[in-house]
Image: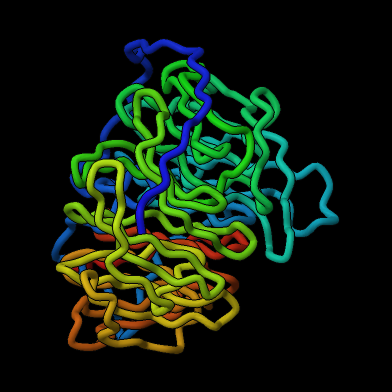
Amino acid sequence: MQCIVITMVIAFTGILFTIGGAGAVQDKVSTSTDWPHWRGPQHNGISTETGWLGGWTDGQAKIIWKQSIGTGFSSMAVSRGRIYTMGNTAKNRSDRNPKDVVYCLDADTGNVIWTHQYPCDLGARSYKGGTHATPTVEGDAVYTFSKQGHAFCLDAATGKVKWSRDVQKELDLEPPTWGFSGSARIVGNFLFLNAGGGALALNKNNGEVIWKSQSAGAAYSTPQPFSAGGSKGLAFFTAESMKAVEIETGKLLWLIPWKTSYDAPAADPIFSGDKVFISSGWNRGGGLFKISGSECTKIWENKLMCNQNNSSVLWEGYLYGFSGNQGGRGILRCLDFNTGQMKWEAKGMGTGSLMMADGKLIILSEDGELVIAEASPKGFKALKRSRILNGTCWTVPVLSGGRIYARCAEGDLVCVDVKGN
């Protein structure tokens, strides 16, 4: 299948500046194990941390602390001894005056260092609602994006607002059915949001618009920088396609038509060499495409990896991820990246989420069980398992500094010791 190249209407309204000085966040721990934004330092769901599988007593994970962070599905960013995440104050639709809250917590104790609040609807439409995106930390700034289009740049040390934009109202952008979802992606001085039919580029230093495209058509993934097949740019799901654009201008590079029920593709693309894997839920499935300039050729496509909520992880030629819709119907699977052949599957964890480190999968089941398993195409082998949460768990856990941070939709965030002695 060939890529379809179309013309986009781009508005250039901003210029770039160097970042201004701000109060520095003092380092508490080494930044080598930081997880400063969605999908981690390399944007692939893989940590380079090693030697962390300890801290378990009599087969049970050791929870160091627990904190309440409000309703939502935002994951955690960890930077310089601090955790940044988001939740909503409402518990259900009847709660009045709902607000999103950005939290900065002490990674050692879970104590609140600062919060930033703003009015935002819970948006509980056929699910619990609440926040979607994960904060993005770069230098002394934290960038957040709400389901209703509030974009903030906050001082990482104090939570003070550096700049803010209500991009939905100001730019007349139409949110997808369940609200904006992708996290902010920083590339140089650009801040990219999956908003509109071809992403939105802001100046990260002042929030000014650099370029924008159509007002409608956003989906739920986070923009992913890539360099593959002689093409270099930014890739992300729109409502009906996987689209790649030039970083500097927003000009379309290539497009893979990809229709998903309810216009709800959410997983990020996974690049390897000159290939890209894309997937979505609702029984749509996944496929691998070869990129050559402005053309893409389908290598394989099947329904064995239907990533509804979260992305898979690619490790040593194999994809690991949850296939199937939420509500206990998901199955953990391992697929050969190059052929799409399934190597194994493991049931019983619902539509959970995962990341990986040191050759091991760090899995959070849909009902709150933490599972550590080998990342091997030979078969599923659990090394450790322990229940750490109750409630709905669709959010990807995070490993940083010998601790795993995990949350449920109802707002419980736990810190698990996996460092040990």
Front-most of residues 178 and 85: 178
Q: Which image quarter is the C terminus in?
A: bottom left
The residue at the point 49 percent across, 26 percent down is 153
Residue lying at 26% horizontally and 34% vertically, measured from the top left? 27
Q: Horizontally, is 332 left or right of 72 in the view?
A: left
**Quadrant the N terminus occupies:** bottom left
Residue 347 visible to an observer of this rendering: yes
Residue 82 seen by the camera:
no
> Between residues 173 and 64, which one lies in front from this camera angle?
173
**Is 194 above or below relative to 367?**
above
Q: Is residue 378 left or right of residue 69?
A: left
Residue 53 on image: x %, y % = 21, 71
- Residue 383 in the image: state x and y as whole percent: 25, 84
Q: Give how far across and how far down residue 54 sits, in percent.
A: 22, 72
User: Number of marks in the image?
Assistant: 0
Q: In which quarter of the image is residue 73?
A: bottom right
Please, is residue 110 above or below residue 244 in the view?
below
Which residue is found at the position 50% from the left and 23% from the top? Answer: 10
Q: Residue at 35% of width from left, 53% of height from top?
A: 2
Display colour scheme: rainbow
Give percent across and percent down for residue 246: 35, 31
In depth, the one of 170 and 46 nearer the eye is 170
